[in-house]
Image: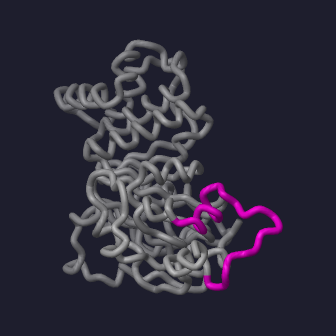
Amino acid sequence: MASERASENWELGGHGDPWNSADEVPLSRRQGANQQNRTVPGSQSPGDSIADPSSQTDSERNPDKYLLELVDIEAGYGRAALVLRGLTVRVPPASVVCLVGPNGAGKSTVLKVASGMLTPRSGRVLVGDQDVTGRGPQRMLEAGLSHVLQGHSVFKEMAVSENVLLGAYTMKDKSEIADRVDFVKSLFPVVAQRWSSLAGALSGGQQKQVEFARSLMVSPRVVLLDEPSMGLDPKATATVFEQVARMRDAGTAVLLVEQNARRALETADLGCVLDLGRVHIAGPAADLLADPQLADLYLGNRRAAGESTPPAGSTATNSTP
């Protein structure tokens, strides 16, 4: 039965590192999963702990394997309870890693920690071979992380060109800036077509492409995207995710937070389901999409009232609706 298969695939209590499966994700978009040759990541109940990759010594780590690592992160706001509780997320080169989960799971907080907007209480943030834990947004930008915030952040009274060039404010070499302008224009045709137009005259989806272009001006290693489809109609949403894939295919890794979980996982190489501030399930995005119980719990196919609950030991027993 499908429910029994799902229970076997995502059995609770696994203590293996969910990022082992990242070794098998290709650098271009993964179209399917090899069920026989992959390591199925375990999920964790709130009382369990993910295997701690921070136990690796610096000599054992391969900084080329992951561009960005958040290792055993605990973080929160002020004196309030922790939002992230021992979370580990890794981003391989030229890949899209998608964070999905219920409201309040800590998805946007992950990006704030990664970009330096929020200092973790414990854990490490690594960019390649650099430990950048606790550094501010400016230092994170210099290390190679670019953050596109939730909502629309273009200056509507300014031209598209002026908005894009704001992303190059740390750059001094005019020829390098010109090269990056040519690059983002080739990647985002709307930016090239509307270069001299006021940003406020563009549609919401077009403005999002301007934000993407601005974020790429500094040649980041990883772009952090927070809810890029927020407020967009289905057609514009589809275009935005096409552009996310184009960024990845052009060599820029993406760490993506998105409420439209199904659409985001269709674009992503790796998926992470967050719940209660931890990575509950992680693995190839195609596998997460194919799992019916995961779809019931997190991808919009909620179980109707009156239906039987999943068997004991399934992911539903420790998930937040």
What residue sits 28% from the left and 44% below the top? 249
**Nearer-the-camera pick, 138 or 86:** 86
Q: Is residue 274 left or right of residue 271?
A: right
Q: Is residue 20 visible?
A: no
- The extreme front residue here reads 1
In the depicted structure, whether residue 304 falls above or below residue 55: above
Rendered residue at 48%/15% (across/down) = 198
Q: Is residue 220 above or below residue 53?
A: above
Q: Which residues are magenta?
A: 291-313
Which percent across, then down, holds residue 147? 43, 46
Judge whether 201 appears above or below 242 on screen: above
Quadrant of the snapshot with the N terminus: bottom right
Quick one: 139 or 237, which is closer to the camera? 237
Q: Position of residue 311 (x, y in %)?
A: 67, 81
- Whether 122 is among the magenta residues is no
By secondary structure, the bulk of the magenta-drawn segment is best described as: loop
